[in-house]
Image (cartoon, coloured by chain):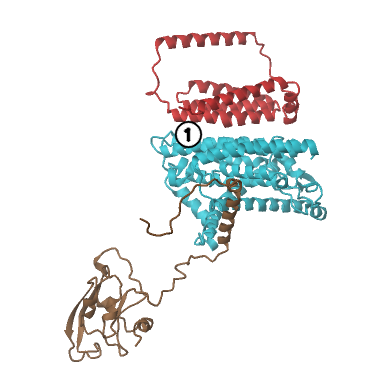
Chain colours: A red, B cyan, C brown
Amino acid sequence: MTSEIIFYFLAAVSVITALMVVFSKNPIYSVMWLIACFFSIAGHYVMLNAQFLAIVHIIVYAGAIMVLMLFTVMLLNLNRESEPHKSLLTKGIATVTGGMLFLVLLAAMRSTQLGAYASPEASDAGFVQKVGMVLFTDYLLPFEMTSVLFISAMIGAVVLAKKEKH
Amino acid sequence: MSIILFKVILIVLIFLISLGLAAYATYGERKVAAFLQDRIGPDRAGPFGLLQPIADGVKMFLKEEIIPTVSDKFLFILGPSLFMMTALMTSAVIPWGTPVSIGGQNFNLQVADINIGILYVLGVVSLGVYGIMLGGWSSNNKYALLGAIRASSQMISYELAMGMSVVAILLMTDGSLSLNAIVESQGEGKLYGFINVSGMNWNVFYQPIAFIIFLITAFAECNRTPFDLPESESELIGGYHTEYSSMKLGLYLFAEYINMFISSAIIACLFFGGYNFPGIEYLSNHLPQNVMSLITFVVLFGKILFFIFFFMWVRWTIPRFRYDQLMRLGWQVLMPLAIINVLLTGAAITFFGN
Amino acid sequence: MQLTNRSKVVTKKEMSFMEKLYLPAIVSGLSITIKHLFKKKATLRYPEVTREFAPVYRGMHVLKRDEQGRENCTACGLCAVACPAEAITMDAAERKKGEENLYREEKYAAKYEINMLRCIYCGLCEEACPKDAIYLTDRIVPSEYARDTFVYGKDLLVEKMDDRIDVSKRKKSYHID
């Protein structure tokens, strides 16, 4: 019963903060709402007894990625005056794209079956040891592929950052 | 006594100790600074100036509260609150001593023994940067913004090396992330396998490189000299808290000392055996359990106080880094060193079996 | 042109590995600072403890009286002549009958003023005085808010009968004969 209340509370927080990300006028506030949203999602992980995932989610997303986002937004100093003028064509294309995405989401939602809340079984699947075992046995290939992807991204960043020799 | 009541008492106690210690750390800092410079330091308020922190606190509360008109008011207030909150949250996973027994029931002297203990610390520490960034940005002042930018890039850079240096420790404790398990593993076994002193099997004897990396990154995470670029008063006035006044400034300064206290506690737990001390086995066989808890708590506190002193000692010895030196140290020295250390530790454990 | 042979050529030599580590340097720095922790502190706890003046300290002036309490000064003006800052002015007057217990000789200073803002405390007045009348003491001229209060008259300069000022230390340092 308690877990159900917490679940619905977290779910509501997730949805509301996610909406606030979109509706906030100030980009800094958008970033802040997104961080709050990440926290509520981390809360969901904790509810599923996946503490490791929850804390890694916070460290990686809230602690590192969002800091960089905030960093960029702060330096850009976005406000109404400096906003670039968008042509009618851009606006039209944006509307069409957004509408299509909305349709896809709607279709996806139509086919999902909304069930009642079922509290998750107590398991240690989300603990560090279990996650590590699974990662390095069943999902070894995807895991290594991801690391290759990261390395290529890193090399790309280094190449971009390196000064051109004249 | 129910476990919840015990935890509430423990949390309140730790909260009070953190705040009290932070208050007296300001006094300690001034005294240490004075002694290291052949001065006496504050000695007017009360005997030896011991009431100085109270006078400072009253002053902070009574000062005029100034919020710049062009600042973002909500974020301006949120900044110091967040910084203080994250500083206080970290203490939840630190084991303060051996379990106490109340009415025949054993209670751990730890608020939450979660199995991701050290990751929780890293996570909360990584959130601490928001307090600085929001405060610096919402002040609408270029010095504050520069301080905030420096703080965030510095903290992100050094977090990686910090995490990597901790990995080597985790490898040594059979992959357990719980701080309690890490501390307990340092209390048993013989040092290097043959020196038989109970409670002396500290990680620092196996992982000196990891210790040095962790120490340096802890300095950087606490924004302490030689890494105090975010608030370097000779360049940026006050850095991210340039525009702050009254108790909001007090919160920033206070939280810095709490961070110092917590990082000292974590250094003590990870590398210096936490509450373990030589001869703990002999004493625990001869003394009642609760007395033992008290002794272990005092021992841990002694270690923490030493590291706080060390923080201050370094502050009055080493000058501030230049920004490019800071980044080079973080990325080109500490980070590869930490990775090599992890590799070496892993190899040593695989081939020599501990 | 070479002025001295002490000049050194600046070289930026490559640091050795140990120097690049910086840790030995940091440790030696830490040991230096920790040594200062145990050194004697230079601070004086001021209101309770005051710093001792050197015997040759030159502070506020005093116009001396002799053993019977008569003013030594005869208003000869040598101090005013000797004063490089021209801080001293005086008016002379003749001693009347019945004033023998006030002034030692027939001529005395009716007015004697030293401008403490002009005075450079060089002590030349003291050296010029043939009558042992003026001395610089180890008292400090107190600070004030207005400039005119710094012109000290006889009321402030002549020593009080019940509060004689000891200048034996200064006498010793100057009159060796």
Q: Position of residue B224 (x, y in %)?
A: 54, 46
Residue at coordinates 37% horizontally, 59% vertically from top-left?
Answer: C3
Q: Using residue A42 as the reference point, say whether residue C123 is left or right of it.
A: left
Residue at coordinates 81% horizontally, 54% vertically from top-left?
Answer: B282
Disc 1 marks which residue? B75
Q: Position of residue B59 (x, y in %)?
A: 46, 51
Label 1, residues with CA under 10 Å away: few <14, some 14-19, many ≥20: many
Residue at coordinates 49% horizontally, 55% vertically from top-left?
Answer: B55
**Above or below C57: residue B207:** above
**Above or below C99: residue B99:** above
Q: Using residue C71 as the reference point, say whether residue B165 is left or right of it.
A: right
Mark 1 residue element? helix
Q: Position of residue C62 (x, y in %)?
A: 30, 78
Q: Using residue B89 as the reference point, say whether residue B282 is left or right of it.
A: right
For the residue pair C55 and C150, the one nearer the viewer reads as C55
Residue lying at the far front in this picture: please name it: C1
Q: Amino acid at mark 1?
A: Leu
For the residue pair C31 and A64, the one nearer the viewer reads as C31
Residue at coordinates 56% horizontally, 28% vertically from top-left?
Answer: A65
